[in-house]
């Protein structure tokens, strides 16, 4: 693990960050295959000790904030519900999101290289369900029943999200079925006074106040 961290800090994180680009003239990034060093590779015997179903059962215990990742422009847009959002760094405001490359959002994301993280409030469960495809909606239809606007990148942003992080894709690292997106945050909004929508044990959850 130590050598993996060292490799990542040398090869992925030490490069200078380009200036924040707005609407036009965005630099394109190379979508890269992550090459595991032999020392970090998992041997064939270890790989199959835990199967996917067991792993998913364990991950049900991981409580997560629910976000909707929007991609595209007004003409061509899609998006997906995600709990894989995490803060990466503050001095260069950056976040990571993991996306399944079989998702309908991936081709748009890959082409346009921008995305918005819309962190949902607890009164926005219907938006989470829509972007998870739970009501059968695809593409633009997922945007019904909510109000949207644009910040810097032109990606649709949810007007009353708990917070919106408008990102330019700085790096995408392929890992098996998924890609880890590193987004450079170039605009944001915050809604004060609202509580987050959470996901835990296979269901949507709300925070309960511990105050009497
Ligand atoms: C609570 C929740 C969290 C999810 N988190 C992720 C995620 O982090 N990454 C991802 O790629 N898909 C995630 N999904 C699944 C996608 O939302 C879903 O597969 C996608 O919207 C449907 O793909 P489609 O656009 O091809 O129809 C999550 C689904 C739910 C309900």
Image (tube, rainbow, N blue to C red):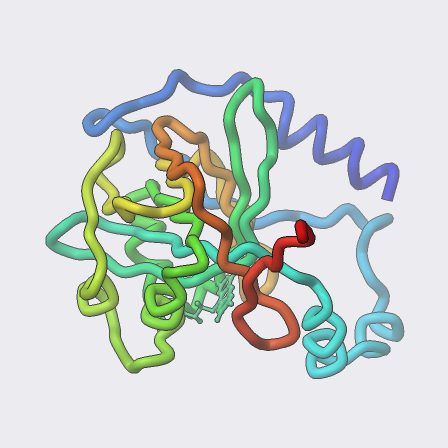
Figure check: 77 above or below 55 = above
Q: Residue furthest front?
A: 212
Image quadrant in which the N terminus is located:
top right
Figure check: 141 above or below 26 = below
Q: What residue sits 37% from the left and 27% below the top?
A: 186
Where is residue 36 shown, x and y percent of the image? Answer: 72, 49
Q: Quadrant of residue 9?
A: top right
Q: Is residue 192 left or right of residue 203?
A: left
Q: What residue sits 66% from the left and 61% below the top?
A: 63
Which residue is nearer to you in this view: 184 or 44?
184
Where is residue 137 shown, x and y percent of the image? Answer: 25, 76
Q: Is residue 166 left or right of residue 201?
A: left
Q: Is residue 25 visible?
A: yes
Q: Quadrant of residue 143?
A: bottom left
Q: Residue furthest left?
A: 75
Where is residue 101 shown, x and y percent of the image? Answer: 45, 63
Which residue is nearer to you in this view: 114 or 80?
80
Q: Is residue 92 left or right of residue 74?
A: right
Q: How many marks?
A: 0
Q: What residue sits 53% from the left and 17% below the top?
A: 16
Q: Is residue 167 visible?
A: no
Where is residue 5 shown, x and y percent of the image? Answer: 78, 36
Q: What residue sits 46% from the left and 37% below the top?
A: 183
């Amino acid at each position: 693990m130590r050598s993996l961290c060292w490799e990542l800090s040398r090869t992925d994180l030490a490069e200078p960050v380009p200036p924040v680009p707005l609407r036009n003239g965005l630099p394109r990034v190379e979508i890269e295959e992550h090459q595991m060093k032999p020392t970090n590779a998992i041997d064939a015997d270890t790989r199959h000790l835990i199967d996917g179903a067991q792993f998913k059962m364990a991950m049900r215990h991981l409580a997560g904030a629910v976000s909707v990742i929007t991609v595209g422009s007004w003409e061509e847009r899609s998006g997906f519900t995600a709990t894989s959002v995490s803060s990466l760094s503050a001095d260069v405001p950056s976040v990571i999101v993991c996306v399944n490359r079989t998702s309908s959002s991936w081709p748009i994301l890959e082409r346009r290289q921008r995305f918005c993280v819309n962190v949902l409030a607890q009164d926005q469960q219907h938006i989470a369900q829509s972007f998870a495809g739970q009501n059968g909606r695809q593409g633009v239809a997922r945007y019904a029943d909510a109000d949207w606007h644009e910040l810097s990148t032109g990606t649709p942003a949810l007007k009353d999200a708990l917070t919106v992080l408008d990102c330019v894709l700085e790096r995408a690292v392929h890992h098996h079925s998924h890609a880890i997106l590193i987004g450079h945050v170039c605009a944001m909004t915050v809604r004060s006074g609202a509580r987050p929508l959470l996901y835990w044990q296979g269901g949507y959850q709300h925070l309960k106040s511990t105050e009497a």
